[in-house]
Image: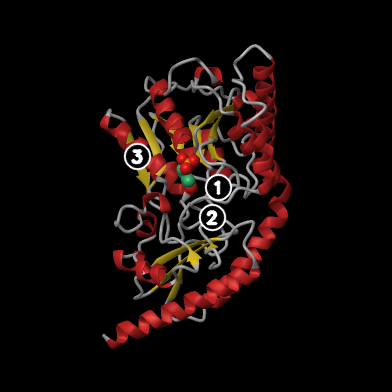
């Protein structure tokens, strides 16, 4: 049998850590109870959920009651943005976000525009970073929310979350951050960073798919939120629906592992990424997208001028699992809105590959992929020069 493809698509999703699978297993079988039930099966499920909530809260310096479990970051973003809009429209109808956000932030904003809210979509600089002065200028007396992602899912750029939090605090505006890519990869402290709402998801940090959470601050200030799912009143009435113990336990285990390994993993991924970049810099007309150092340690996003990314991906089959742009919008053939926001032409945006290295990536794999990309790019350029 052929070797399985080398997986370098960790921004789309990550493989489960074996320790996460182990932790989840008993909750499919012996501890199958509904955590709301008042008997032993329910109690053991509820106890596991309480412990998990505590682990996740601790990882970001929150209180356990401030963690609202959701199906993932898409739902958390929807709850945060629509929930704040609905709870605070009496104070104002203006929201500020950024053009490079994930569609799970942009689309709820578009939806709110259709209801009469006004949204400012701030541009980014050529390196993908938001300019703080532009953010400050965009703030109006009727601004109720600022939503800026912590780490970008395509170019890995880390926004100045702490500074944005300070700015929002001084203007008494709520601050939401989509931390789907950042949580467990870089330190996040919701108190120190003045974050009021933060979206998380387990499957980007070696946990299961279908589970995430929204951090919702309970004091200084207490954030009001309108529920988007109504029913049995679970999660303080903010998100009804029977809690799913295996996923929640897996999420907590993933967070626990991430916190324990974050420092060493950052170094390890940084080294692997430099190794990959060393291969790619052999190519002429190669362009690194996004800030060179202010980015997730496992991320590289590179354009190869004149080489169609789809042709390149096909040329790398079946050896490498990689993606161009964002997996979340990969059904569309439009050029990446993130790369366009950096000032790239459609043409350059169509020549970009996103490398997502992860916990299980080896130096040998990086060498194999680096060599294969260089060979394939050279072959494609050679071919097009002869056409
Ligand atoms: C993956 C991702 C999401 C969506 O998360 P799901 O849990 O898959 O819904 C949202 N925002 C960012 C930045 C992401 O990377």
- Looking at the rendered structure, which numbered label has been put on residue 167? none
Disc 1 within 8 angstroms of ligand 1 (CB): yes
Q: Position of residue 241 (x, y in %)?
A: 49, 22
Please name which of the two marks, 3 or 2, marks the residue nearer to the observer.
2
- Circle 1 crowding by C-alpha within 10 Å: few under 14, some 14–19, many from 20: many
- Looking at the rendered structure, which numbered label has been put on residue 204? 1
Number of disc labels: 3
Q: Are marks 1 and 2 in contact (CB under 8 Å)?
A: yes
The residue that appears at 63% across and 71% down in the rendered structure is: 364
The residue that appears at 37% across and 79% down in the rendered structure is: 380
Q: Position of residue 60 (x, y in %)?
A: 65, 37
Element on which disc 3 rests: helix
Q: Earlier in the sequence, mark 3 or mark 2?
A: 2
Q: Using the numbered discs, state the Cα–Cα distance from disc 3 to disc 2 in whole angstroms.
A: 23 Å
- Where is 125 relative to 50, above or below? below
- Looking at the rendered structure, which numbered label has been put on residue 10? 2
Please name which of the two marks, 3 or 1, marks the residue nearer to the observer.
1
Q: Earlier in the sequence, mark 3 or mark 1?
A: 3
Q: Using the numbered discs, state the Cα–Cα distance from disc 3 to disc 1 in whole angstroms.
A: 21 Å
Q: Using the numbered discs, state the Cα–Cα distance from disc 1 to disc 2 in whole angstroms.
A: 7 Å
Q: Earlier in the sequence, mark 1 or mark 2?
A: 2
Disc 2 within 8 angstroms of ligand 1 (CB): no
Element on which disc 2 rests: loop
- Looking at the rendered structure, which numbered label has been put on residue 107? 3
The residue that appears at 63% across and 63% down in the rendered structure is: 270
């Amino acid at each position: 049998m052929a070797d399985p493809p080398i997986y370098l698509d960790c921004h789309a999703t990550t493989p489960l850590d074996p320790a996460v699978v182990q932790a989840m297993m008993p909750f499919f079988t012996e501890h199958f109870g509904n955590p709301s039930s008042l008997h032993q099966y329910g109690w053991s499920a509820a106890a596991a959920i309480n412990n998990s909530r505590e682990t996740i809260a601790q990882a970001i310096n929150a209180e356990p009651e401030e963690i609202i479990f959701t199906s993932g970051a898409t739902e958390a973003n929807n709850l945060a943005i629509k929930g704040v809009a609905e709870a605070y429209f009496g104070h104002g109808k203006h929201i500020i976000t950024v053009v490079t956000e994930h569609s799970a932030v942009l689309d709820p904003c578009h939806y709110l525009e259709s209801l009469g809210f006004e949204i400012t979509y701030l541009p980014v600089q050529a390196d993908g970073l938001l300019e703080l002065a532009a953010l400050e200028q965009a703030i109006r007396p009727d601004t109720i929310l600022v939503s800026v992602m912590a780490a970008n899912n395509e170019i890995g750029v880390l926004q100045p979350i702490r500074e944005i939090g300070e700015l929002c605090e001084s203007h008494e505006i709520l601050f939401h951050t989509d931390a789907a890519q950042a949580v467990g990869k870089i330190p996040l402290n919701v108190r120190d960073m003045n974050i009021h709402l933060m979206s998380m998801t387990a499957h980007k940090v070696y946990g299961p798919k279908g589970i995430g959470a929204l951090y919702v601050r309970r004091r200084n200030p207490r954030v009001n939120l309108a529920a988007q799912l109504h029913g049995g009143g679970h999660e303080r009435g903010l998100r009804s629906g029977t809690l799913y113990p295996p996923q929640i336990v897996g999420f907590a285990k993933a967070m626990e592992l991430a916190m324990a390994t974050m420092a060493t993993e950052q170094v390890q991924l940084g080294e692997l990424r430099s190794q990959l970049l060393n291969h790619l810099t052999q190519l002429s007309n190669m362009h690194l997208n996004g800030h060179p150092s202010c980015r997730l340690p496992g991320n590289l996003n590179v354009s190869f001028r004149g080489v169609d990314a789809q042709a390149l991906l096909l040329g790398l089959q079946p050896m490498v699992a990689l993606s161009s742009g964002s997996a979340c919008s990969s059904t569309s053939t439009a050029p990446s809105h993130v790369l366009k926001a950096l000032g790239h032409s459609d043409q350059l945006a169509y020549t970009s590959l996103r490398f997502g290295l992860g916990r299980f990536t080896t130096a040998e794999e990086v060498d194999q992929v680096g060599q294969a990309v260089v060979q394939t790019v050279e072959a494609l350029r050679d071919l097009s020069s002869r056409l």
